Image: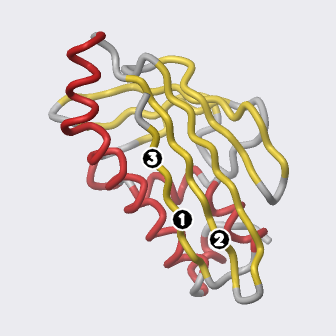
Amino acid sequence: MPTIHLTTFIAAPIERVFDLSRSIELHKKSMANYREQAVAGTTIGLINLNETVTWKAKHLMRTRVLQVQITAMERPFSFTNEMKKGDFKSMKHEHHFKAIENGTLMIDIFSFEAPFGGLGKFFSGLYLSNYMEKLLEQRNLLIKEYAESNKWQHVLDN
């Protein structure tokens, strides 16, 4: 099962980074190029423990639908979302946050298993892992941009 591990430094408080990472609106902005929309479940605001969101987007030349659920949460240190329905055989995204002297380390551990047995494993190794890593990096850059500026105030109601 491929696993992507990313660490992103963000010069902002842990609580802000944690909440921006759970923002449906910010996620939609980060995936605007893919026309990603929240179509069911929690479709606005911050997603919380046991809640689901169903995303619809155009990825890899096809419209995809993915339902994920927040299966674990320890505010502001971590949360996990897991696929309930979608194209992957399985998908789990662990989000970890560590406060450091000058900001927050945001750590993503994203594991997935492609469908289609051996062919899926070949495709995952060849292409899908890089594609998913680029999506996560794109999302993280937008979280960083918002957290380190005053833009976060337009997303979070504090």
Q: Residue 30: which quarter of the image? A: bottom left
Which residue in the structure is indicated by mark 3?
Answer: 4
Which of the labelled discs sits on residue 7, or is there none?
1
Q: Residue at x 56, y 53 (%)?
A: 108
Report the amino acid beneath label 3. Answer: Ile
On screen, 71 above or below 151? above
Outermost residue on the left side: it is 61
Which of the labelled discs sits on residue 115, or is there none?
none
Q: CA distance from mark 1 to mark 3?
A: 10 Å
Q: How many marks?
A: 3
Q: Residue at x 72, y 45 (%)?
A: 79
Q: Earlier in the sequence, mark 1 or mark 2?
A: 1
Residues marked 1 and 3 touching at CB (< 8 Å)? no
Q: Secondary structure at mark 1?
A: strand
Image coords of residue 50 (percent x, y): 76, 30
Q: Residue at x 32, y 55 (%)?
A: 134
Report the amino acid beneath label 2. Answer: Leu
Which colour scheme appears in the figure? secondary structure
Compared across the picture, whether 158 is left or right of 152 comes to: right
Binning the other alpha carbons within 10 Å of mark 3 as few (below 14), some (14 to 19) or many (20 upward) gives: some
Which residue in the structure is indicated by mark 2?
Answer: 105
Q: Secondary structure at mark 3?
A: strand
Report the amino acid beneath label 1. Answer: Thr
Q: Secondary structure at mark 2?
A: strand
Compared across the picture, whether 14 is left or right of 39 comes to: right
